[in-house]
Image: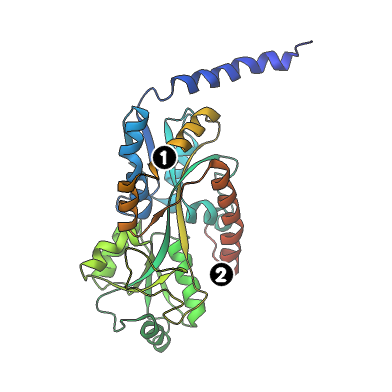
Amino acid sequence: MAITKRALLAAPLLLSGVARAQVWPSRAITIMVPNPPGGGSDFAARLFTEGLSQALGQPVVIDNRPGANGNIGIMAAVRAVPDGHTLLMQYSGYHAGNPAMMRNLAWDPVRDLAPVGMATMAPHVVLAAPNLPANTLAEFIAYARANPGRVNFASSGNGSIQHIAGEVLSRAIGAPMVHVPYRGAAPALQDVAGGRVEIFITTPSSGIALVQAGRIKALATASAERSPALPDVPTTAEAGLPGYTMDAWFAFFAPAGVPEPVLERLNATLRSLAADPVIRRRAEEGGTRLAAMTRAELDTLARAEIESLGAVIRGAGIVLE
């Protein structure tokens, strides 16, 4: 059998990949989080750090890189050496939304990132400032319609799912609202709790403590089911706004080129941790749920989200330069 020159050149690369997989992990693993501490991405990553460290025998550290609608942290992961020592906690809003909103995006969700495993899935909750003269979603809708253009809604940045959620809500209720972007969920929540912004539509993990403390009001859960962490908060359909749902996911990705055995070991470890009752309880207390997936299942979900969320963004006319 003849051996081609191309095969001879490829052989060292293949052997190098196998060798890297055999000695992995050889040092600390870094999880890039493209948001500040305190948000849904950070919450999802920290759920798994201790378990991953114990299972893999190396420290697992969080590196928060907020800014540019997630692109700073995402690009840090994309540019990392693809040896399995750098992971990305990806947010569906960035993964599926940024390609639809940004014409000159420096990364591609399919070409530059490899799916590793699902972390958490979460609904969005319509949160309101304590001084807003509305205690239900119906009362808020009436207030927004009576004050067109005078109601502010927060987001964790231009083009985030919170931004999209606010724009879609504004159109759904027929009342214009003003978008106020922040650099992450934590600073947005501070201004909602302080009464400086009326509405914030975000995942429960970042705001549940403030709701439970009575510092902000939860008007509705924008999902088909109520959140286990907020069982008394009605869904948007129950509150009189059927069809308005906003669900998010947070998942582990790696830079393209990480050896397949490494990716498969990571996926198997994550699926095992998702069955841990302690991690499951912490996830539910934060208003999220675990959803163990194979790499193929995550890839299918992510690709479908790129299409569906992209259609919503284009329909709302949201463009970021």
| Image location (x, y in percent) of residue 10 | 65, 18
Tell me if residue 233 comes above or below residue 52 in the rendering.
below
Which residue is nearer to you in this view: 301 or 181?
301
For residue 20, above or below residue 277:
above
Which residue type does callout 2 highlight?
Answer: Ala
The quarter of the picture where residue 315 lies is bottom right
How far across and how far down the image is residue 176, in percent?
Answer: 46, 79
Can I make out residue 154 in this image? no
What is the x, y in percent for residue 306?
Answer: 58, 55
Label 1 belongs to which residue?
272
Kind of residue at disc 1: Ser
Is mark 1 in CB contact (under 8 Å) with mark 2? no
> Horizontally, is 113 left or right of 289 in the view?
right
- Between the C-alphas of marks 1 and 2, the distance is 39 Å
Mark identifier at residue 316: 2
Give the residue at x 39% y 50%: 67
